Amino acid sequence: MTSIQDRIRELARCRKAVILAHNYQLPEVQDVADFCGDSLELSRKAAATDAETIIFCGVYFMAETAAILSPSKCVLIPDPQAGCPMVDMAPVEAVRALKAKHPGAIVVTYVNSSAAVKAESDICCTSANAAKIVAELPAGATILFVPDQNLGHYVQQVTGRPMILYPGCCPTHARLTPDEIRAARQAHPGASVMIHPECRPETVALADAVLSTSGMLRYARETPADAFIVATETGMLHRLRKENPGKTFHPASDLLICPNMKRITLEKVLWSLEDLKHVVSVPEPTRLAALRAVERMVQTR
Ligand code: CIZ
Ligand code: SF4
Protein backbone atom coordinates (compact mmCIF):
# COMPACT_ATOMS: atom_id res chain seq x y z
CA MET A 1 0.00 0.00 0.00
CA THR A 2 1.23 3.46 -0.81
CA SER A 3 2.12 5.45 2.28
CA ILE A 4 0.52 8.83 2.95
CA GLN A 5 3.98 10.38 2.58
CA ASP A 6 4.30 8.91 -0.94
CA ARG A 7 0.84 10.16 -1.88
CA ILE A 8 1.70 13.65 -0.64
CA ARG A 9 4.99 13.74 -2.56
CA GLU A 10 3.37 12.43 -5.74
CA LEU A 11 0.51 14.93 -5.59
CA ALA A 12 2.92 17.79 -4.80
CA ARG A 13 4.80 16.89 -7.98
CA CYS A 14 1.60 16.79 -10.10
CA ARG A 15 0.38 20.07 -8.65
CA LYS A 16 3.80 21.74 -9.01
CA ALA A 17 3.54 22.56 -5.31
CA VAL A 18 6.27 23.26 -2.80
CA ILE A 19 5.68 22.18 0.81
CA LEU A 20 7.12 24.52 3.44
CA ALA A 21 7.16 23.53 7.13
CA HIS A 22 7.97 25.61 10.18
CA ASN A 23 10.49 24.29 12.71
CA TYR A 24 7.65 23.80 15.25
CA GLN A 25 5.65 21.41 13.02
CA LEU A 26 5.11 17.74 13.86
CA PRO A 27 8.17 15.61 12.93
CA GLU A 28 6.33 13.72 10.19
CA VAL A 29 5.15 17.00 8.62
CA GLN A 30 8.71 18.37 8.67
CA ASP A 31 9.95 15.15 7.05
CA VAL A 32 7.51 15.30 4.14
CA ALA A 33 8.26 18.99 3.39
CA ASP A 34 10.59 20.36 0.72
CA PHE A 35 11.96 22.96 3.15
CA CYS A 36 11.87 23.47 6.91
CA GLY A 37 12.79 26.73 8.56
CA ASP A 38 11.84 29.70 10.68
CA SER A 39 9.37 32.26 9.41
CA LEU A 40 12.12 34.41 7.87
CA GLU A 41 13.65 31.52 5.91
CA LEU A 42 10.22 30.30 4.82
CA SER A 43 9.18 33.82 3.74
CA ARG A 44 12.32 33.99 1.59
CA LYS A 45 11.64 30.53 0.13
CA ALA A 46 8.04 31.50 -0.64
CA ALA A 47 9.20 34.64 -2.43
CA ALA A 48 11.92 32.85 -4.43
CA THR A 49 10.17 29.61 -5.46
CA ASP A 50 8.93 29.12 -8.99
CA ALA A 51 6.34 26.60 -7.77
CA GLU A 52 2.77 27.60 -8.61
CA THR A 53 1.37 26.43 -5.30
CA ILE A 54 2.78 26.79 -1.78
CA ILE A 55 1.50 24.44 0.93
CA PHE A 56 2.33 26.32 4.10
CA CYS A 57 2.60 24.05 7.14
CA GLY A 58 2.65 26.53 9.96
CA VAL A 59 0.25 29.01 11.52
CA TYR A 60 -1.98 31.41 9.60
CA PHE A 61 0.13 34.57 9.86
CA MET A 62 3.05 32.72 8.24
CA ALA A 63 0.97 31.67 5.25
CA GLU A 64 -0.41 35.21 5.08
CA THR A 65 3.14 36.60 4.96
CA ALA A 66 3.88 34.26 2.03
CA ALA A 67 0.73 35.55 0.30
CA ILE A 68 1.84 39.16 0.87
CA LEU A 69 5.19 38.42 -0.79
CA SER A 70 3.91 36.19 -3.60
CA PRO A 71 0.53 37.42 -4.89
CA SER A 72 0.77 35.43 -8.12
CA LYS A 73 1.16 32.10 -6.30
CA CYS A 74 -1.57 30.02 -4.73
CA VAL A 75 -0.81 29.84 -0.99
CA LEU A 76 -2.63 27.07 0.86
CA ILE A 77 -2.76 26.26 4.56
CA PRO A 78 -3.83 22.70 5.50
CA ASP A 79 -5.85 23.99 8.49
CA PRO A 80 -7.07 27.60 8.48
CA GLN A 81 -7.89 27.32 12.20
CA ALA A 82 -4.16 27.17 12.99
CA GLY A 83 -3.99 30.68 14.40
CA CYS A 84 -1.64 32.36 16.86
CA PRO A 85 -2.96 33.84 20.11
CA MET A 86 -0.23 36.48 20.04
CA VAL A 87 -1.65 37.75 16.73
CA ASP A 88 -5.12 37.89 18.29
CA MET A 89 -3.79 39.95 21.22
CA ALA A 90 -3.02 42.79 18.79
CA PRO A 91 -6.16 43.75 16.86
CA VAL A 92 -5.50 46.46 14.31
CA GLU A 93 -7.71 48.95 16.20
CA ALA A 94 -5.50 48.68 19.29
CA VAL A 95 -2.36 49.20 17.22
CA ARG A 96 -3.91 52.24 15.53
CA ALA A 97 -4.82 53.64 18.96
CA LEU A 98 -1.22 53.18 20.17
CA LYS A 99 0.10 54.91 17.03
CA ALA A 100 -2.33 57.78 17.58
CA LYS A 101 -0.86 58.28 21.07
CA HIS A 102 2.68 58.47 19.65
CA PRO A 103 2.52 60.37 16.38
CA GLY A 104 5.74 60.12 14.36
CA ALA A 105 6.92 56.96 16.11
CA ILE A 106 8.50 54.16 14.08
CA VAL A 107 6.37 51.00 14.25
CA VAL A 108 8.43 47.80 14.33
CA THR A 109 6.16 44.76 14.07
CA TYR A 110 7.04 41.17 14.80
CA VAL A 111 6.04 38.84 11.97
CA ASN A 112 3.59 37.20 14.42
CA SER A 113 0.89 39.74 13.52
CA SER A 114 -2.05 40.08 11.14
CA ALA A 115 -1.68 41.49 7.62
CA ALA A 116 -3.74 44.49 8.75
CA VAL A 117 -1.27 45.23 11.58
CA LYS A 118 1.68 44.77 9.21
CA ALA A 119 -0.01 47.33 6.95
CA GLU A 120 0.15 49.84 9.85
CA SER A 121 3.89 49.21 10.31
CA ASP A 122 7.12 50.75 9.08
CA ILE A 123 9.14 47.57 9.24
CA CYS A 124 8.55 43.95 10.22
CA CYS A 125 11.04 41.64 11.90
CA THR A 126 11.39 38.07 13.08
CA SER A 127 13.18 36.85 16.17
CA ALA A 128 16.19 36.17 13.91
CA ASN A 129 16.67 39.81 12.85
CA ALA A 130 14.72 41.95 15.37
CA ALA A 131 17.80 43.28 17.20
CA LYS A 132 19.61 44.15 13.96
CA ILE A 133 16.55 45.97 12.60
CA VAL A 134 16.06 48.02 15.77
CA ALA A 135 19.79 48.80 16.11
CA GLU A 136 19.78 50.31 12.60
CA LEU A 137 16.86 52.71 13.22
CA PRO A 138 17.69 56.44 13.33
CA ALA A 139 19.08 57.54 16.71
CA GLY A 140 16.59 59.26 18.98
CA ALA A 141 13.50 57.91 17.18
CA THR A 142 10.49 56.87 19.25
CA ILE A 143 9.98 53.15 18.57
CA LEU A 144 6.76 51.18 19.07
CA PHE A 145 7.39 47.43 19.24
CA VAL A 146 4.35 45.27 18.43
CA PRO A 147 3.04 42.76 19.62
CA ASP A 148 5.50 40.63 21.67
CA GLN A 149 6.57 42.41 24.83
CA ASN A 150 9.01 39.64 25.75
CA LEU A 151 10.89 39.79 22.45
CA GLY A 152 10.69 43.59 22.71
CA HIS A 153 12.20 43.50 26.18
CA TYR A 154 15.09 41.35 24.95
CA VAL A 155 15.71 43.59 21.91
CA GLN A 156 15.78 46.65 24.18
CA GLN A 157 18.37 44.95 26.33
CA VAL A 158 20.75 43.97 23.52
CA THR A 159 20.41 47.17 21.49
CA GLY A 160 20.18 49.65 24.37
CA ARG A 161 17.32 51.30 22.44
CA PRO A 162 14.33 52.17 24.63
CA MET A 163 11.02 51.18 23.03
CA ILE A 164 7.31 51.39 23.82
CA LEU A 165 6.20 47.75 24.10
CA TYR A 166 2.76 46.52 23.09
CA PRO A 167 1.54 44.10 25.80
CA GLY A 168 1.27 40.87 23.79
CA CYS A 169 3.01 37.53 24.33
CA CYS A 170 3.19 33.89 23.26
CA PRO A 171 1.20 31.83 25.79
CA THR A 172 3.34 28.76 25.05
CA HIS A 173 6.73 30.39 25.65
CA ALA A 174 5.48 32.63 28.46
CA ARG A 175 4.56 29.51 30.41
CA LEU A 176 8.20 28.54 30.99
CA THR A 177 9.39 29.50 34.49
CA PRO A 178 12.86 30.19 35.90
CA ASP A 179 12.39 27.19 38.22
CA GLU A 180 11.96 24.90 35.23
CA ILE A 181 15.30 26.11 33.81
CA ARG A 182 16.98 25.54 37.20
CA ALA A 183 15.47 22.03 37.42
CA ALA A 184 16.58 21.20 33.85
CA ARG A 185 20.13 22.36 34.65
CA GLN A 186 20.16 20.13 37.74
CA ALA A 187 18.89 17.15 35.76
CA HIS A 188 21.46 17.71 32.97
CA PRO A 189 24.58 19.23 34.52
CA GLY A 190 26.88 20.89 31.98
CA ALA A 191 24.23 21.12 29.24
CA SER A 192 24.07 24.45 27.43
CA VAL A 193 20.71 26.24 27.77
CA MET A 194 19.35 27.85 24.63
CA ILE A 195 16.16 29.86 24.89
CA HIS A 196 13.76 31.65 22.58
CA PRO A 197 13.28 35.39 23.22
CA GLU A 198 9.49 34.93 23.37
CA CYS A 199 10.07 33.54 26.89
CA ARG A 200 9.69 35.88 29.87
CA PRO A 201 12.68 38.10 30.77
CA GLU A 202 13.25 36.40 34.14
CA THR A 203 13.45 33.01 32.38
CA VAL A 204 15.60 34.35 29.51
CA ALA A 205 18.04 35.74 32.11
CA LEU A 206 18.99 32.17 33.15
CA ALA A 207 19.96 30.91 29.68
CA ASP A 208 23.38 30.62 28.04
CA ALA A 209 22.17 31.74 24.60
CA VAL A 210 19.05 33.61 23.44
CA LEU A 211 18.23 32.50 19.91
CA SER A 212 15.60 32.24 17.20
CA THR A 213 15.01 28.69 15.95
CA SER A 214 17.39 29.19 13.02
CA GLY A 215 19.92 30.55 15.53
CA MET A 216 19.46 27.42 17.68
CA LEU A 217 20.25 25.15 14.74
CA ARG A 218 23.42 27.13 14.00
CA TYR A 219 24.45 27.25 17.68
CA ALA A 220 23.92 23.49 18.15
CA ARG A 221 26.07 22.80 15.09
CA GLU A 222 28.89 25.22 15.90
CA THR A 223 29.19 25.08 19.70
CA PRO A 224 31.53 22.41 21.08
CA ALA A 225 28.97 21.46 23.83
CA ASP A 226 27.45 18.04 23.25
CA ALA A 227 24.33 18.41 25.42
CA PHE A 228 21.69 21.14 25.27
CA ILE A 229 18.54 22.19 27.09
CA VAL A 230 16.09 23.55 24.55
CA ALA A 231 13.71 26.25 25.78
CA THR A 232 11.32 26.66 22.89
CA GLU A 233 8.40 24.81 21.29
CA THR A 234 9.19 21.06 21.36
CA GLY A 235 8.82 20.64 17.57
CA MET A 236 12.29 22.15 17.42
CA LEU A 237 13.84 19.03 18.97
CA HIS A 238 13.21 16.99 15.80
CA ARG A 239 15.54 18.99 13.53
CA LEU A 240 18.11 19.55 16.26
CA ARG A 241 18.38 15.79 16.83
CA LYS A 242 18.25 14.87 13.15
CA GLU A 243 21.00 17.30 12.18
CA ASN A 244 23.24 16.62 15.19
CA PRO A 245 23.19 12.85 15.74
CA GLY A 246 26.19 12.94 18.09
CA LYS A 247 24.63 15.49 20.48
CA THR A 248 21.77 15.27 22.97
CA PHE A 249 18.88 17.69 23.31
CA HIS A 250 16.55 17.88 26.32
CA PRO A 251 13.32 19.90 26.36
CA ALA A 252 13.35 22.57 29.10
CA SER A 253 9.74 21.52 29.78
CA ASP A 254 7.39 19.00 28.22
CA LEU A 255 4.65 21.64 28.29
CA LEU A 256 6.18 23.83 25.59
CA ILE A 257 3.73 22.71 22.94
CA CYS A 258 1.89 25.12 20.66
CA PRO A 259 -1.51 23.53 19.97
CA ASN A 260 -1.95 25.61 16.84
CA MET A 261 1.29 24.42 15.25
CA LYS A 262 0.18 20.86 15.98
CA ARG A 263 -3.11 21.26 14.08
CA ILE A 264 -1.30 20.53 10.82
CA THR A 265 -1.21 16.75 10.26
CA LEU A 266 -0.17 14.59 7.31
CA GLU A 267 -3.83 13.89 6.52
CA LYS A 268 -4.58 17.62 6.32
CA VAL A 269 -1.52 18.19 4.10
CA LEU A 270 -2.82 15.48 1.74
CA TRP A 271 -6.37 16.92 1.70
CA SER A 272 -4.94 20.37 1.10
CA LEU A 273 -3.16 19.08 -2.02
CA GLU A 274 -6.14 17.03 -3.19
CA ASP A 275 -8.71 19.82 -2.88
CA LEU A 276 -6.37 22.82 -3.30
CA LYS A 277 -7.52 24.44 -0.09
CA HIS A 278 -7.53 26.43 2.10
CA VAL A 279 -6.51 29.44 0.05
CA VAL A 280 -4.84 32.24 2.00
CA SER A 281 -5.16 35.64 0.44
CA VAL A 282 -4.88 39.23 1.59
CA PRO A 283 -7.06 42.05 0.19
CA GLU A 284 -4.92 44.00 -2.29
CA PRO A 285 -4.91 47.40 -0.49
CA THR A 286 -3.83 45.69 2.77
CA ARG A 287 -1.28 43.56 0.93
CA LEU A 288 0.30 46.57 -0.75
CA ALA A 289 0.43 48.52 2.52
CA ALA A 290 2.01 45.54 4.32
CA LEU A 291 4.42 44.64 1.53
CA ARG A 292 6.93 47.42 2.12
CA ALA A 293 7.35 46.51 5.81
CA VAL A 294 7.61 42.79 5.00
CA GLU A 295 10.13 43.39 2.20
CA ARG A 296 12.35 45.33 4.61
CA MET A 297 12.18 42.33 6.98
CA VAL A 298 13.11 39.84 4.24
CA GLN A 299 16.02 42.02 3.11
CA THR A 300 17.60 42.33 6.58
CA ARG A 301 20.06 39.51 7.25
O1 CIZ B 1 10.14 33.39 13.52
C1 CIZ B 1 9.79 32.25 13.71
O2 CIZ B 1 9.80 31.38 12.85
C2 CIZ B 1 9.35 31.82 15.05
C3 CIZ B 1 7.95 31.98 15.42
C4 CIZ B 1 10.24 31.30 15.86
C5 CIZ B 1 11.66 31.39 15.56
O3 CIZ B 1 12.36 32.04 16.31
O4 CIZ B 1 12.10 30.84 14.55
FE1 SF4 C 1 1.99 31.83 18.32
FE2 SF4 C 1 3.52 31.00 20.32
FE3 SF4 C 1 2.35 29.21 18.77
FE4 SF4 C 1 4.38 30.70 17.83
S1 SF4 C 1 4.48 29.18 19.46
S2 SF4 C 1 2.44 30.26 16.79
S3 SF4 C 1 3.99 32.66 18.91
S4 SF4 C 1 1.33 30.70 20.13
Image (tube, rainbow, N blue to C red):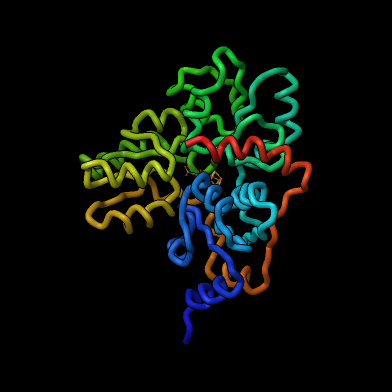
Percent x, y for residue 199? 46, 36
- In which image quadrant can residue 192 be found? top left
Count the labels in the image. 0
Q: Residue at x 47, y 32 (%)?
A: 200
Percent x, y for residue 158? 43, 23
Left or right: 236, with 150 as reference point: left
| Residue farthest to the bottom, as pictured | 1
Q: Residue at x 39, y 41 (%)?
A: 215
- In which image quadrant can residue 238 be found? bottom left
Q: Residue at x 60, y 29 (%)?
A: 108
Q: Nearer the viewer, residue 135 or 146?
A: 135
Percent x, y for residue 16? 59, 69
Q: Is residue 153 above or below residue 14?
A: above
- In which image quadrant can residue 243 be found? bottom left
Q: Is residue 141 above or below residue 185?
A: above
Q: Nearer the viewer, residue 49 or 287?
A: 49
Residue 91 seen in this snapshot: no
Q: Is residue 94 above or below residue 84?
A: above
Q: Residue at x 59, y 49 (%)?
A: 62
Percent x, y for residue 63? 62, 52
Residue 216 seen in this snapshot: yes
| Residue farthest to the top, as pictured | 140
